[in-house]
């Protein structure tokens, strides 16, 4: 006899309930479409560069294009397999930036080779092949993060170990001889033969793990207020210790390594995470005041910082002194402003500008100036909008995270990424003094590419955990759309 609970209204046996709930959409197909769109933009940009620069299409177009398509196809399928519920927009945005960076580095390589031939000099080193190799290694690191960090909460176990390791990475260039660590007045490198690395790029990720674990435990105490002053709830005196320690460490980095960028990034990331953890605006006010006091204090006696400030306040004077052969002065700030000015609103066109005449770091620190000249204000705003979209997706991930450690880690990494973009773009455009950092993903350099791909890998992992549907409660047959279903 058929049980009544499976009969329809007409006495007919009803269809049995499915064993599993229907799978939720993962967004991977959206990601694939966006990656194809990014690939189309990068391919078109490569064709324009070669057509305008060389008046022909070379084998480099096939090499760069095939490498780009192959690498990001692998990255997509890695995310599809290892983090199926991750944010579908983040990877395509990063892929587009990385591809545009490869295009611009290739464009500068071609211009440098043509100029060497015109002057009868030996052709310079081709950097695009190295950058493609660094991108490949960065994507291997990205996949490695997704494979080995299956749950971001496990990183909280290593909070204090990460803090110690991060401090070692930050301090190491300042403790080693300047012959190993100093480049252009800043001691931020480790150079061993042909191998060189920038430890500060990796320290920002490791220290973000430490800050997240520390603030997760101490946030209630740090959120307590002593009194109200001018509309702000001031923290208790005993709670000022952490911010004073971090501020002092950032000042030591600035003094002993003359690394303005890492100092700002390190302290700014802590202030952002402290504000998010405590929801106290007073911490931002304290942070801004302490940053201003530290910068003014160090600039009063540190020659390298003074030179950066002078180049910011009067770039034309700095350019004139450099052209006259006066040591200790640079001309890049003025050259970058000329590149932006000549680009106007729509730019001169890919491969048709002259910002490659920037004599130093045209493909790294000042690569945004090439975008400004050849793509104009519209192109620069589009590039900055892509950066802003990555930060927005990171903040969205922090809001969606179900645990306080994940929220703080996502907001810390997103804040560090946003700060790096701001200080580099602001320095090249003359908004703030130059910091010596590079634009993530578009500038030439292995350390930046590797570290930022690892950063994106952690954000993708947190996003996957946050967007993944929760398991159905045991013994609750009425729960719908809660069972985890991996895509085929």
Image (cartoon, rainbow, N blue to C red):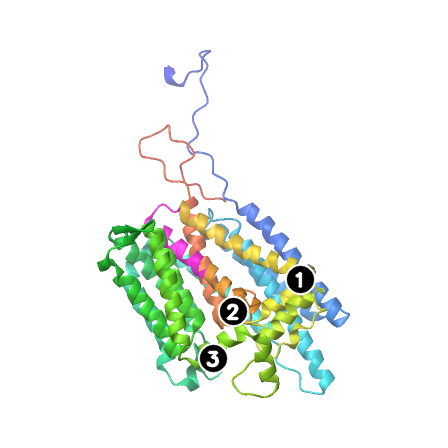
Give the residues in magenta: 401-417
Q: Nearer the viewer, mark 3 or mark 2?
A: 2
Neighbor class of circle 3 (other Cα within 10 Å; few <14, some 14-19, many 20+) is few
Residue at (51%, 71%) from the top-left corner?
434
Q: At which x and y percent is residue 83?
A: 45, 51
Q: Nearer the viewer, mark 2 or mark 1?
A: 1
Which residue is labeled 3 in the image? 195
Residue at (40%, 66%) from the top-left corner?
292
Which residue is labeled 1 in the image? 376
Residue at (35%, 72%) from the top-left corner?
251
Q: Main SS of the magenta segment?
A: helix
Toward the viewer: 144 or 288? 288
Q: How far apart are the two marked residues, 3 and 2, measured between alpha carbons?
A: 19 Å
Q: Is residue 79 visible?
A: yes
Q: Secondary structure at mark 3?
A: strand
Between discs 3 and 2, the one toward the N terminus = 3
- Note whether 263 is above or below 93 in the view shown: below
Which residue is labeled 2 in the image? 438
Q: How far apart are the two marked residues, 3 and 1, measured between alpha carbons?
A: 36 Å
Q: At which x and y percent is residue 320?
A: 61, 82
Q: At which x and y percent is residue 188?
A: 43, 76
Between discs 3 and 1, the one toward the N terminus = 3
Q: Secondary structure at mark 2?
A: loop
């Amino acid at each position: 006899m058929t049980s009544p609970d499976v009969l329809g209204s007409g006495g007919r046996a009803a269809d049995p309930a499915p064993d599993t709930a229907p799978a939720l959409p993962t967004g991977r197909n959206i990601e694939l479409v966006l990656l194809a769109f990014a690939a189309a933009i990068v391919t078109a940009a490569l064709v324009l560069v070669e057509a305008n620069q060389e008046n022909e299409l070379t084998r480099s177009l096939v090499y760069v294009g095939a490498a780009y398509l192959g690498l990001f196809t692998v990255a997509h399928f890695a995310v599809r397999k290892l983090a199926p519920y991750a944010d579908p927009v983040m990877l395509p945005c990063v892929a587009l930036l990385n591809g545009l960076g490869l295009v611009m580095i290739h464009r500068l390589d071609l211009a440098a080779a043509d100029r060497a031939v015109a002057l009868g000099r030996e052709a310079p080193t081709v950097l695009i092949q190295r950058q493609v190799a660094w991108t490949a290694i960065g994507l291997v690191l990205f996949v490695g993060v997704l494979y080995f960090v299956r749950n971001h909460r496990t990183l909280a176990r290593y909070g204090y170990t990460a803090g110690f390791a991060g401090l070692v990475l930050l301090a190491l260039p300042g403790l080693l001889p300047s012959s190993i660590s100093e480049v252009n007045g800043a001691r931020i490198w480790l150079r061993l033969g042909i191998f060189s690395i920038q430890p500060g790029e990796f320290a920002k990720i490791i220290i973000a793990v430490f800050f997240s674990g520390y603030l997760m435990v101490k946030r209630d105490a740090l959120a307590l207020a002593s009194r109200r002053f001018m509309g702000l709830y001031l923290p208790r005196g005993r709670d000022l210790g952490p911010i004073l320690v971090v501020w002092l460490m950032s000042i030591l980095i600035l003094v002993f390594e003359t690394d303005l960028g890492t100092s700002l990034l390190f302290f700014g990331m802590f202030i952002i995470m402290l504000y998010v953890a405590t929801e106290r605006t007073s911490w931002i006010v304290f942070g801004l005041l302490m940053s201003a006091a530290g910068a003014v204090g160090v600039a009063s006696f540190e020659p390298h910082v003074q030179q950066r400030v002078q180049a910011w306040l009067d770039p034309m004077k700095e350019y004139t002194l450099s052209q006259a052969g006066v040591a200790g002065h640079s001309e890049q700030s003025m050259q970058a402003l000329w590149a932006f000015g000549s680009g106007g609103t729509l730019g001169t066109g890919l491969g048709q500008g002259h910002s490659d005449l920037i004599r130093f770091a045209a493909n790294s620190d000042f690569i945004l100036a090439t975008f400004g000249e050849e793509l104009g204000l519209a192109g620069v705003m589009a590039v900055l909008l892509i950066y802003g979209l990555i930060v927005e997706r990171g903040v969205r991930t922090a809001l969606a995270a179900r645990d306080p450690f994940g929220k703080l880690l996502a907001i810390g990494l997103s804040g560090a990424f946003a700060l790096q973009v701001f200080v580099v773009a602001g320095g090249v455009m003359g908004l703030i003094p130059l910091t010596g950092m590079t634009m993530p993903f578009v500038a030439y350099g292995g350390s930046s590419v590797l570290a930022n791909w690892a950063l994106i890998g952690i954000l993708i992992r947190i996003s996957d955990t946050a967007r993944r549907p929760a398991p159905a409660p045991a013994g609750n047959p009425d729960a719908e759309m809660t069972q985890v279903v991996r895509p085929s």
